[in-house]
Image (tube, grey):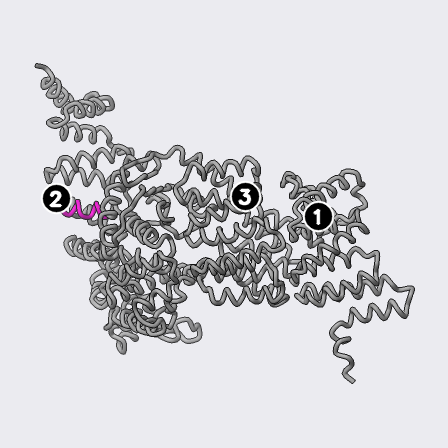
Amino acid sequence: MPGNPLINANRGFWLGFLLAAILPSAPLLAESLILEDSLEKYRTGQYAQCVEDARSAVEQFRWSRNWRILYLQSLLAVGQYQEAFTAVEQIIERFPLSMRLSQLAHSVYLANGQNEQARQILQQIHRYAQSTNSSYWDAEDIVALGEVLLLLGGEPRTVLESFFNRTLEQDPDCRAAYQAAGNLALSKYDYELAGDLFQNALKRFQEEPDMHYGLAQAFFPSDRKVMIQALDAVFQINPNHVPSLLMLAEHQIDSEDYPVAQKTLQRILAVNPWRPEAWAYRSLLAYLENDHTNAGEFRTKALKFNPKNPLIDHLIGKKLSQKYRFAEGVKFQQQALKFDTEFLPAQMQLAQDMLRLGKEEQGWKTAHAIYEKDAYNVEAYNLVTLDDTMKKFRTLRTDDFIVRMTESEAVVFGDMVLELLQEVKAALCDKYGLKLQTPVTIELFDQQQDFAVRTFGMPGGDGFLGVCFGHVITMNSPKAGRPANWRAVLWHEFCHVVTLNLTHNKMPRWLSEGISVYEESQKNPTWGQHMNAQYRQMILAGELTPISKLSGAFLAPPTHMHLEFAYYESSLAVEYLITKYGLDTLKAILADLGKGESINQTIEKHTDKLDTLEKEFAQFVTRRAESLAPNLDWDVPDDLTDPNHPPPTPGQWLKTHPNSLWALTEQATQLIRQQKWEQAKTPLRKLIELYPNSIEPDSPYLLLARVHQKLDETDHEYNVLNELASRSPDALTAYERLVQLAAAKNDFHDVVIHARRYIAVNPLLGKMYFQLGRAYESLDEKPQAVKSYERLLHLDPADPVDIHYRLARLLKDTRPDRAKRHVLLALADAPRFRDAHKLLLELTNKETP
C-alpha cells in the first residue's frame, strides 16, 4: 500500500510524535526530528504548514525555545502579525533570557507598530548582556546581541569584529553570523564587501535561500544579470521567498514592466496578505498610473499594522525618484522622516534627491549630518568627500546656466561650454515650446569616479558620459572618460532638460533617450547614433525590443553593445513617430505625459493601436538595416571557428563572394601585414565603395590612409581622412593628422575646421590651440588667435616665451597694456630675446606723450 499521503508528506513530523508517544526515553530525538522537518518546510517556503506544526509543537514541547522562534518567524512570514504579538508576550514571559527570542520580539513589536515596546526590549537585551557571563551563550545568541547593539547605535566595526567575525572564527558553520555580517555591509552601502561575504557563505550554505538573496542584494545596484541569477537560485529552493519576490518586483518596476510586476506582487500577497512593502509597491504603481485613489488606499493597507512605518513612504519616494520624479520623491522622504527622524535610508535618499534637484545646500548638509552620525556609511562618505572636491571647482554663471568645472578646465574651455549651452537652449526650447523658469546647473568632473558618486551615489557607472535630472546635468569631462564628442553629449543632455521639464519628469526612459539621440543627429549628422554592422546583425537576428518594453532594455543589457543598441533603437522609434505622424504629434504625447497619462495609452491616442504601431516600426527598422551597404556580402564561411576544417583563404572566398566584407577585410589586413601597400589599395577602396559609413575603430578609411602615408601619397591620404572626418564625431587620430597635413600646405582654413573637430572631443591638447592660433593669425582673425594662444598658456606649452610674444604682437594695437604684460613675461624667461625687446621699446614709446 502506498500509505497515507498526509503522513508521507510530513514524515519527520509524525515520526517525531510517534517516538515521543512510544519511547518516553527519547523526547529529545523526537523533538529534533519534528523540528528538522518543520525547519525544512520553512526553508522551502511552506510557511502556512510551518505555522500549524509550530502551533502544535509548542504545546507538546513546552520548554523548547527553538519552536517558539520558528512559530514567531512563521507567523511573521504569513502576515499574522496580531497573533504573533499575542504569542510573543507569553513567550518572552517564559523565556526572558533568550537573546534570539527577545530579538525576534523586537521584530514582532515593530510589525505591529509598537515602537516603544520595541525600544524597551532592545534596552532589556542590552542590560541582560551586561550582567550575564557570555560563556553561556551559543553562537546565534552572540550574533543576535551584535545585531541588537547595531540597532542601539553600536560602533559597526566593533560589532563586526567582536561579534560576527569572532563567532565565525569559533563556529565557521554559523549561518547567522555570515548573514549578519553581510547585512551590515549592505546597510552601509558597501556592496562589494557584502558580495564577498555572501559568496563566501554560499560555499558552505548553497541550499540556503537567504544567502542567495543576500548576494542578489549586493549586486542589485551594479549588475542585474548576476542579481537575477541569484534570485533564480532562491526560487529553485523556495518559490515563496518574499524578500526575493519583492526584489524581483522592484526590478520589474525599474524595467517599466508594470503588468508583470503586478503579478509578482500578487504572488507575494498570496503568501503574506499584509506584507507592507508589497502594498507600498502597489501604491507606487497606482501613483505612476495617476490613480491617486488606489495609491492612497494601498498605502493605507501598507501602514495597517504599523501606521508610522517610515519604510513605506521611503520605498514609494525612492522609486519615484528613480523614475526622475525627484520633487515627488522628496515629499515622500520627508513624510517618512516625520514618522522617524532617524530613519537613515530616507535621510540618504533625501540628500541625493536634494542634490539632483539643484538644492545643493540642503543636500550637502544632510549628507554631512549622516556621515557625522555614521562614519561607516559608504554612500555618505563618498558624498562628503566629493563635496570637499567640488568646493575647489570654479563656478561660471549666466542668467540661464550655472556651470561648475575644475579650475584648470574652466580656464581652457569653460566659455565654450557656456556658448554651446546658449545655442542648444535657443534651438531646443524654441522647437519644443519650453520656457525655462530657473537656471540649469551643469557639473563637469575630471575624475570618472567623482562623476559616478555625484550621479549614482557610488563609484561605478562606467560607460555613462552624462546624466540629466531635470534642472541638473552631470557629465564626465573630456579628461575623465573615453574619447567622446563632449559637444554632442552636452546637446544630448540638455535635450533631456527640455523633455523632462515638459513632462514634469513623467516619461519613460526610452522616449527621453530616443528624443535626445534623435536631436543630436538633427544638430549634426555625425552626432547621435547610426546604423552599423553590429546593429544590422542584431536587428536581422530578431533582437529588436518592442516599443512597449523598450525602457527595460536599458536596465540589464547583457553587453555594452546591447545598451548602445537600446539608445539607437529608441532614437529610431522617435524618428519613426516624427516621420509618420509629425513633430506636433510627439509634442502632444509629451504634453499628455506631463498630465500623468500612461505612455502606451498616450501613444495610441495620438497615433495607432500599439500592436499595429510596433509591427510597422519593426518593418521600418528592418528596412533601415537592410539598406545598410546593400551590395555588401555579409556572409562568412561556416567553418571559421572549426579547427578540424580550415576556412577558405580570402582569395578563394572572393571567387564566389566578390563583395564579401569578411574576405575583403582579411585580404587587406594580410596585404598590409606583408607591407604590400599598392596591392592593399584595391580591397580597401572596394570596402569603402560598398560600405561608405564604416567608421568603426578598424575602419577601412584609416587603413587606406595608412597605405597612402606609407607611399608618400599625401594628397590621397588627406582626401581619405577628410572623408572619414566628415562622417565621424570622434575620429581623433584622423583629425590630428588632418591638422598636420593642412598646416604643412598652409591651408589654414582647413586647419581651423579639423582643429575645432579635435577640440570638440579633446579640448585639452595644447598643440591644437597652437595650430589654431597660427591659422587664425594667417587668416587675420586676431581675436580668435588671441583666444587660442591664451587657452594654450593654461596647458603648459613647450615654449611659453613664443606664445607670450605672439600674444603681445596681436594685442599691441588694441590692448597695449596686455601686450606689454605678455612681452615682459616673455623677457622674464628669455632676457636676450631681441624681437621682444624691440616690441617692448615700441610699446613704451607709445606710452610716452
Three-letter residue code for mark 2: Asn
Magenta stretch: includes residue 65: no
User: Which residues lie in the magenta part?
Assistant: 748-757
Whether residue 635 can be seen here: no
Three-letter residue code for mark 3: Lys
> In the rendered image, which residue does mark 1 sit on?
143
Task: Pick the quarter of the image with the C terminus.
Answer: top left
> Where in the figure is residue 511, as x and y percent of width and height?
34, 60
Magenta stretch: includes residue 750: yes
Out of 164 and 740, give the one closest to the viewer. 164
Out of 341 and 224, give the one closest to the viewer. 341
Out of 434 and 527, give the one closest to the viewer. 434
**What kind of element bears circle 3?**
helix
> In the rendered image, which residue does mark 2 sit on?
746
> Where in the figure is residue 152, as x and y percent of width and height?
66, 41
User: Which dot, 1 or 3, sits closer to the camera?
Assistant: 3
> Where in the figure is residue 275, as x and y percent of width and height?
60, 59
Rate crowding at label 3 as few (under 14), some (14 to 19) or many (20 or more) other CA atoms within 10 Å.
Answer: few
Rate crowding at label 2 as few (under 14), some (14 to 19) or many (20 or more) other CA atoms within 10 Å.
Answer: some
> Where in the figure is residue 644, as x and y percent of width and height?
44, 75
